Image (spheres, rainbow, N blue to C red):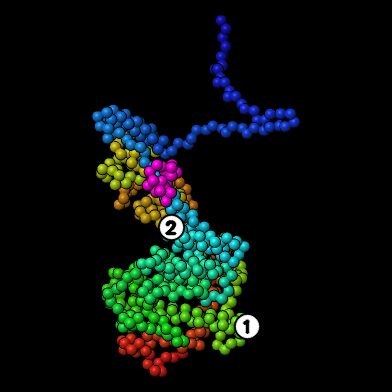
Amino acid sequence: MYLGCASAPTAPEEPTHPTSAVAGDTTVVAVAPASKCCPKPTLWDFLGVSAALKGVAGLGRRVVNRLGSRFPGLEPGPPMTAIADPANLDSPDPSVAAAAEAKQEEDKAPQKIKAIRYLATLGCGGCYPGIEAALLAKLEDCTEEVRYEAVKALRGTAGDPCQVCKAKACCSPKVLEALDKIANDTDDQGCYKEPSPRVRRQARLAMQGCGGSAAPPEDVPTEGPTDEPDAAAGQPAEQTAAASEAEKSGAVLARVNGEEIRDTQIVAVVDRHLQQVATELPAPARSQLRQSLIRREVDRSIQQALLRQDAQRRQQLGAAGAETAGGVMPAYFVNPSVSAEEIDAYHRAHLDRFTLPADVRWESLHARFARFASRDEARQALEYVKLKALGDARLPHPPRGVERVETETYGWTDPEQVAAAPVAKALASLPVGALGHLVEDASGLYVVRVLERRPGRVIPASEAAEQIRQEIIQSRRQRTQQQRVDHLRRQSVIWTLFDEPTPAAVGATNQPPRGHETAR
């Protein structure tokens, strides 16, 4: 009898594939086959929920198939596909094919808008001649948001209407013709061919920036050129004492060197703003706020008129004559160079704007009350999932509704920005990797876990240098423009409705008394 140790039989090795071969004078190199690896399990796989759901689903299908002989309506129909599914394009049903084609085109809108905004930063006067044609093509897009962004991009390249040099402006005759059609073309019934009011309004503003005609029709005052945000039109019940009579007649609210500023746009803008922000104010406070806003809008319109008149004088005088003409200062210049010292000083003065708060990456288990029969059922399901995640081996049978618990993973988040206060508190205090207690808000129950923490930090001036440089230049531009406006005010004759000692009487006559119109 022989004694000894027998080694366990080993599994045959997998055949290795050749990595190269020689054919004549040529060596052929083969790519090694990809290594096989198991897919990473999901959280539901780890908790065993996926296997349980597959078993329940299989049992349900068998029961339904058994009942199908007596109750055919119980048998499942064909699966519902997404509207934009490519297979629907070949559907024999024309409605399904048309819906798929339309949905696919509408889904491209965000990408189109992104491209339009980038083209607007380049303008039409550079090295890329196709930009103008691309923007013009988007003016005829079926999606309103795309047309709006295209017109807004054309307006952005045109710059301020008082700006003389516009090297990047898309203001060719072809562009102006297209904008004019959008703004003013109507069909045989008198309806605008461009159905969107905000697109028509942006087209008029773009024409104004290019120096073209942008006067709105009298019957659509809310669509005229204005820099106010888009808003729904609205009319309040009360009128201010200073402008009530002027509103009734569409009268003059101010004059700048003989140019009239009427209430057509000003009152409409103020009333829309009030409808948005002051609906809960009592009547006296609302009336006082309205009068203050009208004064502010009148002053803004006066400033725009001064700059517009100044730009027209410069164009008439020419570059050489503008420097020597009486009462007209040389064209204002903004120095684009910003020193490192200025950037550092600006960074120190606005340190709070460059300070990033501490934030976390986290995940949550969420039992929404709306998905459960009761709060107790939601709580039991979430507690079971939490214990399962902690590896508790003494778990009972899964409670009802455990599959309705949702899991979500979130990127870097400032806990103070989380709307649910209990969740925000848990994120601020939990250690990394630990599961928190069940917390509740109006929508349901949560269990959160912090995956990673990142302390707050200050963005150094070197990283934010370009942003700071642009903000400094913009501040210089605004300061220089304000100085120019102050100079023009001193050289101009300005009258406003609010200058009168008795506004009601002046509104009735709509004429300033002799001798009250003064230079400011």
Mark sitting earlier along the chain (2/1): 2
Residue tagged 1: 320
> Can you give x and y, in whole percent of width and height, for residue 484 in the image?
53, 81
Residue drawn at point x = 49 percent, y = 52 percent: 454
- Indicate left or right for 237 with 437 as reference: left
Identify the residue at horizontal 40%, vertical 48% (top origin).
98
Residue matched to label 2:
143
**Is 374 within the magenta?**
no
Q: Secondary structure at mark 1?
A: helix
SS of the residue under disc 2: loop
For mark 2, does the 10 Å Cα neighbourhood hold few (<14), some (14 to 19), or many (20 or more) residues?
Answer: some
* Residue 178 placement (x, y as % from top left): 49, 66
Q: Is residue 472 visible?
A: no
Type of amino acid under label 2: Thr
Question: What is the x, y in percent for residue 477?
Answer: 54, 74
Magenta span covers which residues? 83-102
Q: Magenta stretch: dominant SS? A: helix
| In the image, residue 463 above or below residue 249 | above
| Cα–Cα span, label 2 and label 1 | 47 Å
Q: Position of residue 248 (x, y in %)?
A: 31, 81
Of the two numbered discs 2 and 1 in the rendering, the one whose residue sits closer to the viewer: 2
Q: From this viewpoint, which residue is outermost toward the front?
A: 188
Name the disc covering residue 450, or none: none
